[in-house]
Amino acid sequence: MYQILFTLPLQKLPVVGGWFPPDGYPVPAFGVMLFCAAVLGTAWATRRGAKAGMPGPRVQDMVIVIFLGGLFGARLLYMIQYHHQFPDKSIPGLLLAFVQIWKGGIIFYGSVVGGVVAYLVFYRVVIRRLQPRVSAWQLADAVAPILALGLALGRIGCYLNGCCWGQAAVPEACPVPLGGAHFPLLPALGRDQLVKDQRLQTSAGFTVVPPARGGDPRAVVGAVEPGSAAEAAGLKPGDKVVGVNGRPNGAVVEVLGGAEERARAVAALTAEGGREEPGGSDRASKVAFDDWLKAGDGAAAARVAAPGVTLIQSDTLADAVRDWPRSRHDLALKVARDGNEVDVTFEPRTVPLYPTQLYETVSMLLLIPLLLAFYPFRRHDGQLMTVCMAVYAVHRFVNESLRVEPAVGLGLTLSQWGSVVILAAAVGIELYLRRVMPNRWAAAPAAP
């Protein structure tokens, strides 16, 4: 369960929002599973589309259009629901954030809306003009199992990505199907929820003693979580962190203020031996010092050069944990203990969580043979799709009860309300098709 499977050796190539990282382009696990779902789904849809009389090239075109429409809708709904994660509300800022989908953030029910809209457009522009005519409901039955396959693969991507997990599980008190999931904590998408909101654990398995004002900013371990990877690696209370991932644990000064004031403050800090770090923003810059003693002199000079700025001082450890790269898993510390320096390396992990992603994968994999077996016995065209919609809606509603999501009305989450809408739509479509579609179960009229 790693967000980044591997990196491609691409450096110094421009991309949207900057350059590729120095270590190369990270290939996310979620993106790989989406790619697998798109390729396998297209190949299978090409074969099954023939059952509805649709040419293979047109099926492939339809899959691409629906995939792109679903991706657009999923990203748009995420940005609407979690708008607080996008502080730059300008049009260029929102457009840039929208295309940076590799940073995470899509919602399935947004993909449903986007995919349906894309299909309706494709149907009106392409499918209606095909000769011989293609039945939309026969086509829906043909692709229903493929939707289940895409969901199954997509949720494996969620599991690898460390998102969409369930509530904290206690296997010792209650059996957890498939076992509790321990995701890499530092790069996990839900770290803030587990650490800041629910206070279930710390960022890396230990607490830090607040430093004295104006004193040594380097972290001193206050307490170590029992049973954590930090404890197993030998980290002890009182250890002073003097190195982080091969670098000295120096001081990091964050400068907040206007562009001109920040520029003067950064110049004063760098003149005292600091170096400006990448990863700043329109309102903040960061300057790092390997020698923490020089940071105090630099801060004093910055306050004189730019009186209006705000300076926030921390250490390399705090800065690294806050902006932890998704491609890194181990936290390598060098700590000072009893006059000696000790290396402590471990991989922080989350508390056990219900693997709700895998529950959906299993559910959809069981749904595929059910749909394939039911296909010859369907009452009318379109019934396979309504069965697929109804089963998924019921599963998702129940599965959501194991997740940690805010309620938006009557105690239900947004996804649970989406499940209610999908189930109601499935029932409504089924009732409509029973009235207008020929009954395959009725006896054929006798020959004259």
Image (cartoon, rainbow, N blue to C red):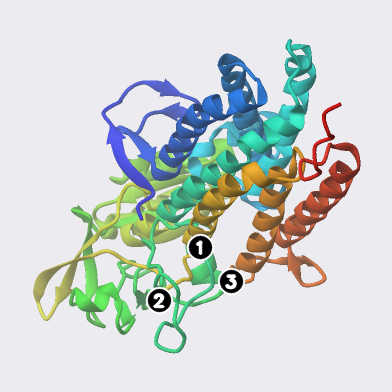
Dot 2, how many residues are within 10 Å of its Cα: few (below 14), some (14-19), or many (20+)? few
Q: Give whichever of discs 1 and 3 has the lower sequence position.
A: 1
For the residue pair 192 and 55, the one nearer the viewer reads as 55
For the residue pair 135 and 428, the one nearer the viewer reads as 135
Q: Which residue of the protein is positioned furthest toward the bottom in this rendering?
A: 173
SS category of the residue bearing label 3: loop
How far from the left and from the top, in percent, is residue 420? 78, 59
Q: Which residue of the protein is positioned furthest toward the right in this rendering?
A: 435
Mark 1: amino acid? Tyr
For the residue pair 270 and 231, the one nearer the viewer reads as 231
Q: Give whichever of discs 2 and 3 has the lower sequence position.
A: 2
Write down the quadrant of residue 260 in the picture: top right
- Name the residue located 72 percent from the left edge and 62 percent from the top edge: 416
- Name the residue beneath numbered marker 3: 402
Q: Do the residues labelled 2 and 1 touch (CB within 8 Å)?
A: no
Left-right relation of 342 to 360: left
Q: Which mark is residue 359?
A: 1
How far from the left and from the top, in percent, is residue 267? 41, 38
